[in-house]
Structure formats: structure tokens, C-alpha cells
Amino acid sequence: MPALVGILSGSASDKPVVDKITSTLDELGIAWEYSVLSAHRTPNKVARYSKEAEGRGLAVLIGVAGLSAALPGCLAAHTTLPIIGVPCDGGALGGADALYSVAQMPPGIPVAAVGINNGKNAAYLAASILSISHPEIKAKLQAYRKSLGDE
């Protein structure tokens, strides 16, 4: 199955948060791909990735970044695909700066924001988006939600 979700992190140090995303997507049977690309150090590569994503079959992009957390917004600037931003903790503000950066996008360039380090919710949000056109993902997501009530 080709990847439906593209995951980018601004730094290899964000990998523990990425692992929360990928393990959850794996549990739901959703194919993904992962790359480390920085909005500041490799901006042209980020733009190219975003512009080419839909043509390669990706349907949702997840940007994981801390501090200024510009990566999700940079992705959103170059595609109309849904973008989910995962702010990471770090620096003096414990991730609050990253959360604000992800959430405070200018009108017309939206990025969905999940909580600081909350890779699991990013994966579940991606699954919710994909469930609109993938009945098998919808069924798995519904079963998961039912299990939450059963616990």
C-alpha cells in the first residue's frame, strides 16, 4: 500500500514524537513515510516536498517541530492538503512557543494543531481525515473509539 501520510520533522531530535505517530498509524494500518527536513535549514526541500506530496499519493502531511515550529506552516504554504502540526517541547518555554507558532497561522493558510508532543493525536486526526474516503480506516478508527468506552 502506498503511503497516505507524509511525516516531516525539523530535526532528528524530534524522533520520539514521530515514533508516537508512526506506531499509531501502524496500529491503524495506515501507510506513511518520514523525512527530516528543516523549514530554516532546508526550506527549498520542504517546499518541493509539499508541492509534490499530493502527486505522489499523500493525502495528509504532519509537521513535527519545536521552538519556532515553522515547519507545519511552511508545508501549508505550498499545498492545499490538510496539514497537522505537532509542537514539541524544548527551549525556555517548554513548547508553548511551538504551540503558538503552529496554532497562530494567518487566514487562508490553516494548520491543525495538536497538543505539545501529542503525536498520537496527530495520527488519530490524520486517520479521521482519511476515513472520509477510506472505509477500512473508518472501520478501524470506529473500533478504536469503541474500545475507549469499553475500558
Image (tube, rainbow, N blue to C red):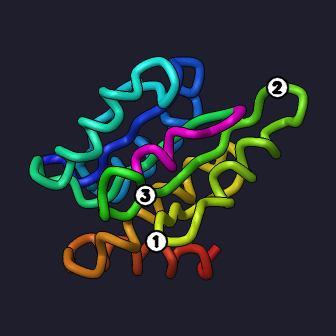
| Quarter-of-image position of residue 69 | top right
Q: Is the magenta stretch mostly helix, strand or loop?
A: helix
Q: What residue type is labelled 1?
A: Tyr
Dot 1 or dot 3, earlier in sequence? 3
Residue 105 coordinates in the image, percent (x, y): 60, 60
**Cβ–Cβ below 8 Å for labels 2 and 1?**
no
Mark 2 lies on residue:
91
Is 106 rendered above or below residue 73?
below
The Cα–Cα distance between marks 3 and 2, rounded to whole angstroms, is 24 Å
Residue 86 appears in the picture as rendered: yes
Residue 49 coordinates in the image, percent (x, y): 26, 37
Mark 1 lies on residue:
144
Dot 3 or dot 2, earlier in sequence? 3
Q: Is mark 3 on a helix, strand or loop?
A: strand
Residue 48 coordinates in the image, percent (x, y): 24, 36
Q: Who is closer to the viewer here, 27 or 134? A: 134
Q: Which residue is drawn at 47% across and 25% down?
A: 38
Q: Give the side of residue 61 with respect to residue 13, left or right.
A: left
Q: Which mark is residue 83?
A: 3
Q: Give the side of residue 148 with respect to residue 145, left or right.
A: right
Q: How many labels does the image show?
A: 3
Q: What element carries label 2?
A: loop
Is 90 rendered above or below residue 73?
above
Q: Residue 108 carries which label?
A: none
Residue 41 coordinates in the image, percent (x, y): 48, 18
Q: Is mark 1 on a helix, strand or loop?
A: helix
Q: Residue at x 29, y 70 (%)?
A: 130
Front label number (1 vs 3): 3
> Which residues make up the magenta segment?
67-76
Front label number (2 vs 1): 2
